[in-house]
C-alpha cells in the first residue's frame, strides 16, 4: 500500500502500473483529497493519453474503482479530468465491431446498490468474474464494447444524464420500492405506509452520489403530503423524514444553477415524482427515465425538450427540500409540538 508520505514525495508519473493500481484500491469515498486526488489525476491522465489503447481497460478499472470517491467530494480538477477521460474512452472504444451478444457490464448493473462498484469488474486483470451466476470469458471482459460500457457507467455516476447508450432498467429492488410508493401516494397502499416511509427516511447513505441524493430528496417530497395527512398517526414517521431531509441538504453541491426560468421539473404529479425518485438512483434507472422522455441512442444529448439534468440541480433540490420540510414541520402541530425549521 502507498502511504501518504510516499504520495507527497514521489511523483505519481513515476509509479508503475502495479503500484498505481495498488494505490487506487485504497481510495474510498471518505479518503482525504490530498491523498486521493493525485491517484485519480494520474489514472485519468494515463487514460486520456490513449483512451483507445491496449491499457485503456486498466485505467477505466481504476476510475471505476474510485468512482465512489469521485462522485462525492473530490477536487474539481480530479473530477473533471476523470470524467473527460472516461468519456474519451467510451467514445474511442464504443463503436468498434464486436461479435458478442452481450457483455459483463450489462448483467452486473443490477446488483450494485447506491452506485458504488465494490465488486471486481474484471477489467484490471482481464480475468472472468462470476457474479449472479454469470461467467464471462476473457474475450468478453476485455472486449472494447465492455470496457466502453463500464466507462459510460462510471461517467454517468459522476455526472448524471450526460451519457447515452446505457442499458435502460432500474435495479429490481428499486422497481419494487417504486410499486410500494405508487400505492401509497395513490392512497391504496400494498404495505404498511408508516413503516415504508420510515424506512425511506432512513435509507440515505453517508456518502451519497448525486443521483442517489437527488432521488432521496425527490422521494421525500413525493411522500411528504401523505405523511402529513391524517393517514399517518405515528409522529415518529414525520420526525424521521424531517431528520433525513435535514441531514441530506448539507450534502448538496454549491454548483450554480444553469437552468433558465421554467426549466426545473414540475413536481405536481406525486405518482410520477415517486417513480422518478427511484429512477434517479442508478445509471440504468436514469437511462430508463431518459428513454421514457424520448432520448434517442446518440452519444450526446441533443435538443431534448426537458433538461433532465435539472433533476439533480442543487438549486432545484434545495427548494424541494425546503418545501418538504415546511409540509412536514407544519403537520407536527397536529401532534401538539411543532419544531423549528432550520
Image (cartoon, rainbow, N blue to C red):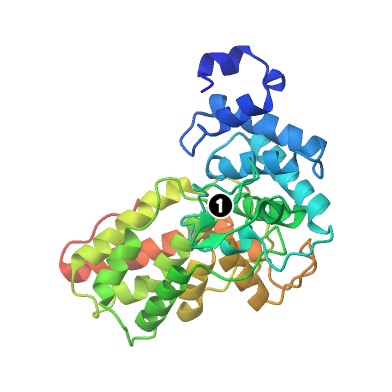
Give the image location of residue 216, x and y in percent: 44, 61
For the point 37% across and 78% down, the residue is 180
- Is residue 38 something one can see in this rendering? no
Residue 190 pos. (x, y %): 31, 83
Q: Which residue ends up furthest to the top in the rendered image?
A: 9
Question: Which residue is at 71% across, 50% downward?
Answer: 142
Vertical placement of residue 73 versus 13, above or below: below
Q: Which residue is mark 1?
A: 129
In the orientation shown, which residue stands out farthest toward the bottom? 188
Q: Looking at the image, which is closer to me, 202 or 120? A: 120
The residue lying furthest to the left in this view is: 336
- The image shows residue 218, relative to residue 1, as above or below, that is below
State the image quarter where residue 14 is shown: top right
Q: Is residue 319 visible?
A: yes
- Give residue 284's position: percent from left, percent from top: 59, 65
Say which residue appears at 68% left-offset and 39% top-offset. Answer: 58
Instruction: Decide which of 129, 53 is in the foreground and name it.
Output: 129
The structure residue drawn at horizontal position 69% and vertical position 62%, both measured from the top left corner, is 260
Query: Dot 1: what SS?
Result: loop
Left/right placement of residue 254 relative to residue 199 reads right
- The quadrant where residue 124 appears: top right
In this rendering, the answer to whether 321 lies above or below 59 is below
Which residue is nearer to you in this view: 88 or 289?
88
Tag 1: Cα neighbours inside 10 Å, few (<14), some, or many (≥20)?
A: some
Residue 35 lies left or right of residue 155; in this view the side is left
Coordinates of residue 65 in the picture (x, y in percent): 57, 42
Q: Is residue 91 above or below residue 124?
A: below
The mark total stands at 1
Amino acid at each position: 500500500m502507498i502511504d501518504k508520505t510516499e504520495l507527497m514525495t514521489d511523483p505519481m508519473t513515476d509509479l508503475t502500473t502495479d503500484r498505481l493500481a495498488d494505490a487506487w484500491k485504497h481510495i474510498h469515498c471518505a479518503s482525504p483529497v490530498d491523498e486521493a486526488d493525485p491517484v485519480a489525476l494520474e489514472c485519468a491522465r494515463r487514460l486520456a493519453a490513449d483512451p483507445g489503447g491496449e491499457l485503456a481497460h486498466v485505467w477505466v478499472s481504476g476510475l471505476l474503482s474510485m468512482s465512489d470517491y469521485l462522485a462525492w467530494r473530490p477536487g474539481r480538477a480530479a473530477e473533471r479530468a476523470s470524467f473527460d477521460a472516461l468519456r474519451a474512452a467510451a467514445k474511442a472504444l464504443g463503436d468498434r465491431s464486436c461479435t458478442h451478444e452481450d457483455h459483463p457490464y450489462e448483467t452486473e448493473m443490477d446488483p450494485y446498490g447506491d452506485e458504488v462498484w465494490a465488486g471486481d469488474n474484471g477489467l484490471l486483470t482481464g480475468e472472468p468474474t462470476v457474479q449472479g451466476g454469470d461467467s464471462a470469458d476473457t474475450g468478453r471482459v476485455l472486449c472494447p464494447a465492455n470496457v466502453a460500457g463500464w466507462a459510460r457507467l462510471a461517467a454517468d455516476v459522476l455526472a448524471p444524464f450526460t451519457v447515452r447508450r446505457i442499458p435502460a432498467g432500474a435495479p429490481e429492488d428499486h422497481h419494487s420500492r417504486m410499486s410500494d410508493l405508487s400505492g401509497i401516494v395513490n392512497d391504496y397502499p400494498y404495505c404498511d405506509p408508516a413503516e415504508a416511509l420510515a424506512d425511506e427516511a432512513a435509507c440515505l447513505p453517508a456518502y451519497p452520489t448525486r443521483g442517489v441524493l437527488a432521488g432521496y430528496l425527490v422521494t421525500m417530497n413525493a411522500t411528504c403530503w401523505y405523511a402529513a395527512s391524517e393517514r399517518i398517526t405515528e409522529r415518529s414517521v414525520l420526525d424521521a423524514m424531517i431528520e433525513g431531509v435535514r441531514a441530506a441538504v448539507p450534502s448538496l453541491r454549491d454548483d450554480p444553477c444553469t437552468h433558465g426560468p421554467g426549466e426545473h421539473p414540475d413536481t405536481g404529479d406525486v405518482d410520477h415524482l415517486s417513480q422518478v425518485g427511484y429512477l434517479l438512483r442508478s445509471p440504468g434507472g436514469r437511462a430508463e427515465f431518459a428513454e421514457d422522455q424520448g432520448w434517442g441512442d446518440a452519444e450526446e444529448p441533443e435538443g431534448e425538450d426537458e433538461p433532465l439534468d435539472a433533476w439533480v440541480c442543487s438549486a432545484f433540490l434545495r427548494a424541494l427540500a425546503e418545501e418538504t420540510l415546511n409540509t412536514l414541520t407544519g403537520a407536527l402541530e397536529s401532534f401538539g409540538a411543532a419544531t423549528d425549521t432550520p
